[in-house]
Amino acid sequence: MTEKDFLTKALTDTALTRRSFLKWSAALGGTAALAGGLSYGLKAVGTVAAETNGKWLCAPCWGNCGGRYPNYALVKDGVVIRQKTDDTHPDSPEYPQQRGCARGRSQRHQVFGADRLKYPMKRKNWEPGGGKRELRGQDGWVRISWDEALDLVAGEIKRIKETYGNAAIMKGGYSNSFTKGFGEVTKMLWQYGGLVEPWGITSAGSWQNSALFSGDGGTDLNDRFDFVNSQLIVMWGRNDSWSSAGNPSYYLLQAKKAGAKFIFIDPFYNPTAQALADEWIPVRPATDHALALGIAYTLITEDDPINNPLIDWDFLNRCTVGFDADHMPEGADPKENFQDYVLGTYDGLPKTPEWAAQICGTPPATIRKLAREIGSTKKVAMLTSASTARVHNSDSWPHAFMTLGWMMGHAGQPGRMTGRSGVDGGPGLIGKGGTGLPSVSNPLGKAGSNYPKDGDGVVKLNYAESWTAVLTGKHTQGKGDVRDIDIRMIYHDNASQLNQRCGMTKGIEAHRKVEFVVAHHFSLHTQAKYADIVLPVTTQWERDGMLDGGREYLIYMNKIVEPLFEAKHDRWVWMPRQSGRSPKSKCYSTRWPEPR
């Protein structure tokens, strides 16, 4: 459907007067208007009456948060006229409705937003090889046809591959199967000789790989039903009501009602703390590690197994290595144990609460009080999030946090746990299965989100080093192993790495250096603005259904509306060219089924 058709349909179905517009706006919660004009994806008149004629469909939410719950859209004649959350069964803590949050429901504004990319565009001053690269992010745009766009993109990929090799092509973001692209760009470029995929992800920060040695925090937490058994729940850098909306805060509320005390450690008195906190302890941003060491020092120096037991020595001795000199891994230097580091035995710097306070800003008395309370309480849930690990020099923070919880034995017992996942921890109870698509691999070595494997031709480029690698031509392959790299092209197929990864200014500079930048998206977001060619793609609401969900539920998500304007599925972009299109673009092969 074209923009004109869509607007015409929405407006002709609506006897739009000032009074009806205000009534419509009120019925929709004040969301009737968008920046730039009428919210033409929503219908104005007869909303309630139309329910009997429309059809409720379960709509996908592609926010990719820890909640990820369904929204239901009432669709009539291809137009969304209402939304609601799950009401398919009575609500209870044992069997809760899967509540869609405000962020998920606002996705209709993304689907029908005034900023939708309507057709392929190229940068006004672009030409093969880069053109005026310094104008990326400032240049004007020229509308082009899909045939021209595909020919230009394919031609540049082919030119760069033949001139510099596949290692000159860098994937711009993390391939998340739930967001937009299903990794189509990545998989197709694998079949065309490969590309450089940076490893590690922005979202988890240093948890992603540090956790390989200290528990990843994903399945380390107990089942959500066990929170009611906790006496004390420590929320360290967590704000579930904001970052994982929907049911997580509801689950935590059940623990609150059961009598659990909540302590929040955070620079901000965040919305979740406002709802649940019994105590809020401020800490300076990015100084959590120092606070944890100050707590550990108190536990070690004040522990008395007989009169004041704060440390669970039985758990440490049976289940961990590295805490003290007597329990180091084979071959390790005994002097490198955690306890002696905290006490300053060898470096002469005890990590006292006074030492920690100078860094984190939390008063020494508060640090000692917190250590005593966590150590003396039997059933404690120690919960953190990835946010505390999305800072520079946070490599050892996951170890510090997990070690702190394990010192007191808060793991694997009723009401006792330590980890960073959502509040519905434990192994998954139900899964959606595989896609059934053929397996392909990256000839340059797929790094994914874990440590990449060594091998011929493998490029181990870390996300945090991506922009520096583009600008300097150097990257760290491994410890003490700095190698040359020559990135000439950046391909963005999903995510928003330019404004999510550290060093945005450096990222812009990197985008203006390479010879070619292409981006798939449904709006002209940050990294699309710095591309040479943008390709409009469909949202999940405009695609055939898929399964997704959480640990204990699955959601089938329907196609809600037909693709708007000239938007196409990412998979369509990479399919073999059909008759009538330029044969020049047939430079990729695929066995993927055609998207409907």
Image (cartoon, rainbow, N blue to C red):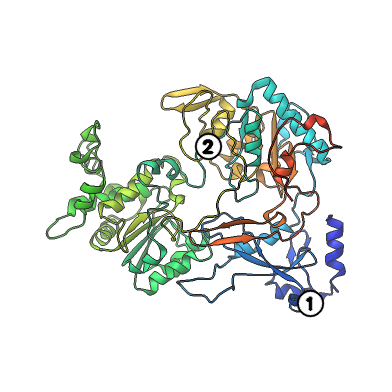
Instruction: Place residue 7 in its image quadrant.
Output: bottom right
Instruction: Place residue 196 in its image quadrant.
Output: top right
> Residue 418: where, in percent of width, then height?
35, 55
Q: Are marks 2 and 1 in contact (CB under 8 Å)?
A: no
For mark 1, does the 10 Å Cα neighbourhood hold few (<14), some (14 to 19), or many (20 or more) residues? few
Instruction: Place residue 421 in its image quadrant.
Output: bottom left
Towards the viewer: 509 or 475: 475
Check disc 1 and report the residue beneath it. Answer: 46
Which quarter of the rendering shows the N terminus? bottom right
Q: Is residue 246 left or right of residue 307?
A: right
Can residue 126 be seen in this snapshot?
no
Residue at 18% x, 54% y: name it. 302
Check disc 2 and report the residue beneath it. Answer: 463
Judged from this view, the residue extending furthest toward the left is: 306
Residue at 67% x, 57% y: name it. 545
Towards the viewer: 235 or 513: 235
Which numbered disc, 2 or 1, marks the residue that appears first in the sequence? 1
For mark 2, does the 10 Å Cα neighbourhood hold few (<14), some (14 to 19), or many (20 or more) residues? many
Q: Is residue 26 above or below residue 148?
A: below
Q: Nearer the viewer, mark 2 or mark 1?
A: 1
SS type, badge 2 = helix
What type is the residue that disc 1 sits on?
Answer: Gly
Q: Is residue 522 left or right of residue 330?
A: right
> Residue 392: where, in percent of width, then height?
45, 41
Judged from this view, the residue extending furthest toward the top is: 163
SS type, badge 1 = loop
What type is the residue that disc 2 sits on?
Answer: Tyr
Residue at 81% x, 41% y: name it. 146
Work out how far the residue at label 2 is from the one at label 1, CA to CA, in angstroms.
50 Å
Q: Is residue 355 above or below residue 488?
A: below
> Residue 523: where, in percent of width, then height?
71, 49
